[in-house]
Image (spheres, rainbow, N blue to C red):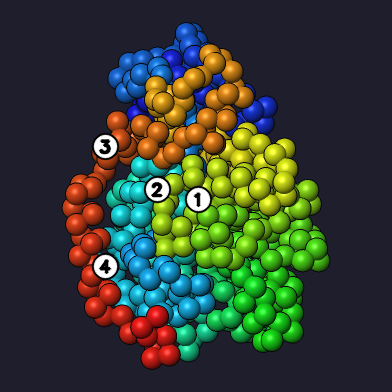
Amino acid sequence: MSHRIIIDDVTIVTVNDAADVIFGGTIVIDGDRITSVGANGAAGIDRTGAQVIDGSGMAALPGLVDLHYHTALGKGWSDHLPLYEYLQSCWYPMIRALDPEAAYWAALASYAESLKSGTTTVNDMYRQLPALGRAAGEIGIRAVLCNDVADVEHELDSLDDNAAAFRELQGSADGRVEVLIGIEWLPLSSGGLLRDARALASDLGTGIHIHLNESLSEVQISMEKFGRRPTEFAYDCGILGPDCIAAHCVWLSDAEIALMRETGTHISHNPVSNAKLGNGVARVPEMLAAGINVGLGSDAAECNNSRDMFQVMKWASLVHRATRVDASLQQAPDVLRMATRNGSAALGHETGQISVGSLADIILVNLDSPSFTPLMPEHSGHLYSHLVFAADGSSVDTTIVNGQVVMRGREFTTIDIDEVLAKANEHFRAVVGRMKVPAEYAGL
Ligand SMILES: [Zn+2]
C-alpha cells in the first residue's frame, strides 16, 4: 500500500471548477495523488499507518506554479542596467561561464527559495540541464526544464543539447522532471532555428518555452531583422501552439493577441520582472478578454530578486488597476487561479487544484499571523483577499510535492539548506571570476 498522508481540520481553498472553499475539511493523499477531499469527519477514512498533519489554523492551497523561471546564480548582480545592457554585460557572460556543479548548487538554492514560498512547480529555462534535473530530483520540486537555445555564434545552447537533455531527463524523478524546447529570444535566433525548434518539439512530442515581445527593443530588433513583429514571426515559423508557453508578451499588438488566441498559445505574465527592467505593463485585461490562458511567473531572480509568487500575485493585480485606473480589475480569486490552475494547464499538468484524482502538490499557509488578522470565520472573500494582497511567502508552513512533504514547519526534509547556501555563494564567486564580458560592455 502506498504511503498515506491525512491533513485534518484545515481550510481548503480548492481552486476547483466551482471554486469551493471548505472550512474545516480533511484531505487524504495516497502516494502521489489526492484521494479524498471533504468536510471533517468523513466516514471511511482508514488512518492505519497514515502520516497525520494537523491543519488547524492553516489554509491548504494548490501549490503555486511559476510559469516563467530561470535558475539563477547571480541574484542582484549588475541589476542596475536596462535589459539589453544587462544581458550582454552580465547574464550571458555568467551563463557562459557556468559549469555543472555551479548549475547544480544554483538550482538547489533557487528551488529552495521557491519551495519555501509555496511554489511547487517551476518552468525553468537555463543551461546544464542534467545538473538541474539532479537538483530537482533531490530537493523534491516539480521542474519543467529547457535549454537556452540560440544561434551558434551566441555561445549558448543548441537544439542538440536540448534534445539530449530530453532523452536523458524526460519523466525522471517519478515524473517530476520534464523537458521542453527552449528558445532564448528572437534577437538571438534565425528563422531556420525557430523552424528547426518546432520540428524537434514535434519529433520528441514535447512543447516550447520562449521569451516573446518582452521589450520595445526586442520589437524593434524583430522589425529590423525579420520585417515582422515578434509574435508574427514566431507564428510564421510555427512556434506558437497549445504546447507553447510565451513569456512576457508585454508589447502585443491587437493582431498579435489574435494570433495567440488562434493558436491556443499560453502566456506567462511576469509583472515584477517587467517593472524592474522598465519593460512596461502587459495587456493582460485584453489577453483575458480574448480567452487566452495566462499564468504567472517570477522570471530570473536577477530581474525580480525574489522567487515569491505571493508578491507576483499582488503585482499581477495592482499594476493593472494602477495603470487603467480601475479597481475592478484582477480580483483576488482570479489572480490565485492564474498562479495555480492556469499555470498547470499551460504545462499540461494534473495539478493546480485540490481535487480527487489530482497530483498531490499542496501548500499549507499559516493563518495565525498578523497578515491574516482580522479574518472573518468562514468568509472566503476575506481569505482570498489576504492570500493575494496581505500574505507573502513566509506565510507558507508546509510544502508537499507529488505526495512528498518537502518542507514542514518551514524546515526542509530533503536537503541541508546551510550547505546549499554556502555552496551557492562559493560557486557564484567562482563564476564571476571566470566571466568574460565583451569589451564594449565592460565596466557598465
Ligand atoms: Zn526570462
Position of the C terminus, as image quadrant, is bottom left
Q: Please state which amino acid type lies under the numbered disc 1.
A: Asp
Measured Cα–Cα span from mark 2 to mark 1: 9 Å
Nearer the observer, 138 or 427: 427
Mark 2, residue position = 114
Proximity of marks 3 and 1: CB atoms separated by less than 8 Å: no
Measured Cα–Cα span from mark 3 to mark 2: 13 Å
Q: Please state which amino acid type lies under the numbered disc 4.
A: Phe
Nearer the observer, 111 or 373: 373
Q: Please state which amino acid type lies under the numbered disc 3.
A: Glu
- How packed mark 1 is, by other alpha carbons closer than 10 Å (few <14, some 14-19, many 20 or more), is many
Q: Earlier in the sequence, mark 4 or mark 3?
A: 3
SS category of the residue bearing label 1? strand
Q: Residue at x 19, y 49 (%)?
A: 418
- Residue 209 location in percent, x, y? 56, 64
Q: Residue at x 68, y 52 (%)?
A: 323
Is residue 376 depicted above or below 336 in this figure? above
Measured Cα–Cα span from mark 2 to mark 4: 19 Å
Mark 1, residue position = 66
SS category of the residue bearing label 4? helix
Q: Earlier in the sequence, mark 3 or mark 2?
A: 2
Q: Please state which amino acid type lies under the numbered disc 2.
A: Ser
Mark 3, residue position = 411
- Residue 330 location in percent, x, y? 67, 41
Proximity of marks 4 and 3: CB atoms separated by less than 8 Å: no
